[in-house]
């Protein structure tokens, strides 16, 4: 197993030109695994408890009030 102190627990690769995103998470063996890949759908962070986003928001850029309402914060 790799020393997990040197690795980010998750990372995102976002390609706005292709409107495509990959979300990778470090597993218990120290290997990164794709947790989500695509242009639409909901990504739920394992590291940020309760945080999620609609991937299409990354290119559609909805009004912040819309995002906050979906998150139950508005």
Image (cartoon, rainbow, N blue to C red):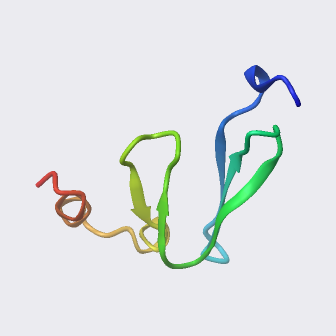
Total residue callouts: 0
Q: Position of residue 59 (x, y in %)?
A: 48, 71
Looking at the rendered image, the quarter that the N terminus falls into is top right
Q: Residue at x 49, y 69 (%)?
A: 55
Query: Please, which residue is most extreme toward the left here?
Result: 74
Q: Write down the quadrant of residue 7 in the picture.
A: top right
Q: Residue at x 83, y 22 (%)?
A: 3
Q: Is residue 33 above or below residue 46?
A: below
Left or right: 66, with 53 as reference point: left
Left or right: 8, with 58 as reference point: right
Left or right: 16, with 4 as reference point: left
Q: Residue at x 17, y 57 (%)?
A: 72
Q: Write down the quadrant of residue 34 in the picture.
A: bottom right
Front residue of this view, candidates 52 and 60: 52
Q: Write down the quadrant of residue 71 in the picture.
A: bottom left
Q: Position of residue 15 (x, y in %)?
A: 66, 66
Q: Is residue 37 above or below residue 6?
A: below
Front residue of this view, candidates 34 and 63: 34
Q: Position of residue 18 (x, y in %)?
A: 67, 77
Q: Position of residue 64 (x, y in %)?
A: 24, 59
Looking at the rendered image, the quarter that the C terminus falls into is bottom left
Q: Is residue 13 above or below residue 27?
A: below
Q: Residue at x 31, y 70 (%)?
A: 62
Front residue of this view, candidates 25 and 39: 25
């Amino acid at each position: 197993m790799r020393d997990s102190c040197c690795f980010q627990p998750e990372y995102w690769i976002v390609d706005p030109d292709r409107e495509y995103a990959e979300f990778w998470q470090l597993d218990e063996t120290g290997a990164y695994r794709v947790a989500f890949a695509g242009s639409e759908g909901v990504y739920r962070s394992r590291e940020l408890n309760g945080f999620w986003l609609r991937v299409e928001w990354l290119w559609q850029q909805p009004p912040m009030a819309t995002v906050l309402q979906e998150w139950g914060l508005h």
